[in-house]
Image (tube, rainbow, N blue to C red):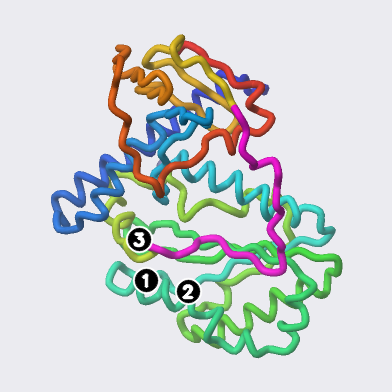
Amino acid sequence: MEISESDRIQKRINGKRNSTDIATKLLVFVDNNFPEDKKFIKRLHRQINCNNKLIELKNGRIISMFCDCKTCHICNNLRLVKFLKKYLDQVKREPVKYNMVLTIKNPGTEDLKKMIDKMFAFFRNSGLKKDNTFKKLKKEVKVIRSFETTFNKQMKTYNIHFHFLIAGKNRNDVKLLGKIIIKHWRKYFRKDADSKAQYLRQQKKSELENFKYLLKLKEVNDGTIHMLYHLLKAIHGRKLFSTMNIKPLKSDELRDEYVKVDYRKLKKGDIVSCYYYSVEIRSYYNSNTKELLENNKLVKNAKRIKIEKRNQRIVSDYLRQESKKLSTRKK
Ligand SMILES: [Zn+2]
C-alpha cells in the first residue's frame, strides 16, 4: 500500500490534535487535583499552543514557538529527527547490532520517582563504571540508551525500563558489553531486577523501532491520565536519550535555511506543510509590514507578538531540502 502525501499530512494533523487532547485532559486533571502546580499548568498551555503561530523575523527567518513538552507530538517528532541525524545514522552503519532491555520491578506512584532516580544513578554509582572490561569495550562499541515507560492500568504500576541499541564491528564485543551491563544491573538492584525480565537479543527489526520518546501517546486515556501526571513529575528535567562512544554529527542538514512563503495568500485553516511537520495557520505576523493575520483577518500596524525566547525555534532549520517541497494546501 502506498501512503500518499495527503495521508501523511493527515496523520500529522491527527497527531497534533491528539497531543492537544492529551494536554487538555491533563490540564483538567491537574486543575482539579493539583491546582497549586502552576508551573505544570503553564507548560500544558504551551503544549496546547505549540507551533500554532509562524512569525517571520526581519532577517527573513521564519520562527515558531515550540513547547518542549514530553507529551507533545510535534516536539517529539523534532526530537526524533535530531536524534536520527545525530546518532542513529552512525549506528546503522555498524555490522553487528544488539537490542537490550533493562527493567526493575514495576513501582507504584509512591516510589516511582525514587526508583527512576535509582535507575539513572545506576550508571554513576554501580560497579559498572569500575569494571575494566567495560572500560575497554566502551571505547569500541557504540550504545544508544532510551528511558521508556508503559502503564499497568489494572495494578496502577509503571513498567519503567531502558532500551539499548548496542552496535559494533565485533559480535563478541557487542554481546559481552550487554552481558556486563546486565550483570551489574542485577547486582545493583538485586531482588528488584528479575533475571528473566532483562534481555539481550540480536537486532532484527529496524533500529528505530527500538525507540520511542518516554511513552506511546496512544496509551494515554482517561484511565491513565493520573499516571501520566505522576510520570511527568518524576521524570522532569531528565534527559531521556543518552549515547556512548558516538560523536554527534555536525549535520549541515540541520542548518538554517531561508524559506519564503507568501503568507498574505494564506487563510486561516490552510495547512503549510513540509516533510517533518505541518502547521495549521491560525495567525501570522510580518515584522516588516507589521501586518498580523489573525482569525482570517489582516490587522495593520499590529503590535509584535510577544514570544518567550527560550521556546523560539527556527522552523527553517528543520526544513532542509524539503523546503523545496514546501507547499500550501487547503484543508
Ligand atoms: Zn510542542
Q: Secondary structure at mark 2?
A: loop
3D distance between C-alphas at marks 2 and 3? 16 Å
Q: Secondary structure at mark 3?
A: helix
Can you say whether 209 is above or below 327 in the image?
A: below
3D distance between C-alphas at marks 3 and 1? 11 Å
Q: Residue 104's mark? A: 2
Which residue in the protein does label 3 denote? 231
Three-letter residue code for mark 3: Leu
x then y, percent, for residue 307: 34, 39
Toward which corner of the image does residue 291 lie, by quadrant?
top left
Three-letter residue code for mark 1: Pro
Q: Residue 107's mark? A: 1
Q: What segment is highlighted magenta in the picture?
A: 236-258
Mark 3 or 1: the one toward you? 3
Can you say whether 244 is above or below 13 in the image?
A: below
Dots 1, 2 in contact, CB < 8 A? yes
Q: Residue at x 76, y 53 (%)?
A: 92
Toward which corner of the image does residue 172 lie, by quadrant?
bottom right
